[in-house]
Amino acid sequence: MSGEARALGWVGTVVPRVKVLGVVVDVVVRVDVVAHAARRAGPVLDRDVLATWEWPEAVREPEVVRLVGVVATGTHWRGALRDAVRLSGFCAVAIVGVDEERCRLECAYAGVGLVVEGTVVVVPRGGRAVGARRRTLDRWVEELVYQRLIVDGVLEPVARPSATP
């Protein structure tokens, strides 16, 4: 998958086969190692806590990962396109597909990139879908990927503060 991310010009850490909202995709994220070191706790997936972090006046945990792009694959390009469009509100999206006219047209219409054999055939829209704004669900997805980076050993677990007597 790193070949597709490189072809698309997406710089970041590739996290393969992440299940996001029922869709299994490869995710490219930018990791902030300084934010990771500053975290007082590991990934948080509690919606109520994440909602308070998104308040402008809140003291919030720093964002360790930011979504750069998502690449969907599948047994058929239509299924991959459906999955990519579903996640287009979060970041740039692309599929690995075939160089057929119908596939190119559908991808271009949806703003989804198309990569065929390591070559970008349709350039994806830069960033999230037009009109999509940041919300608590964005932070939840970022925390989900952050958790995966720790489980996979890409990032060290956050050191818990020691209790003082």
Image (cartoon, helix red, strand yellow):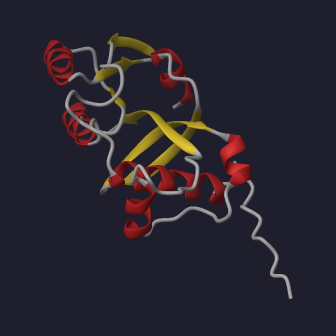
Q: Residue at x 39, y 13 (%)?
A: 120
| Quarter holding residue 105 | top left
| Quarter holding residue 95 | top left
45 in relation to 99, above or below: below
| Residue 145 percent across, percent down from the top left | 51, 51
Q: Residue at x 35, y 20 (%)?
A: 126
| Residue 63 percent across, percent down from the top left | 55, 47
Would residue 159 be found to the left or right of residue 57 on screen?
right
Q: Residue at x 37, y 48 (%)?
A: 138
The front one of 45 and 123 is: 45
| Residue 156 percent across, percent down from the top left | 75, 55
Q: Residue furthest right?
A: 165
20 in relation to 96, above or below: below
137 in relation to 124, above or below: below
120 in relation to 81, above or below: above
Quadrant the C terminus occupies? bottom right
Would residue 113 be found to the left or right of residue 79 on screen?
right
Q: Residue at x 23, y 22 (%)?
A: 111
Would residue 56 be found to the left or right of residue 113 on screen?
right
The front one of 93 and 64 is: 64
| Residue 9 percent across, percent down from the top left | 50, 16
| Quarter holding residue 133 | top left
Q: Residue furthest bottom?
A: 165
Counting labels gives: 0
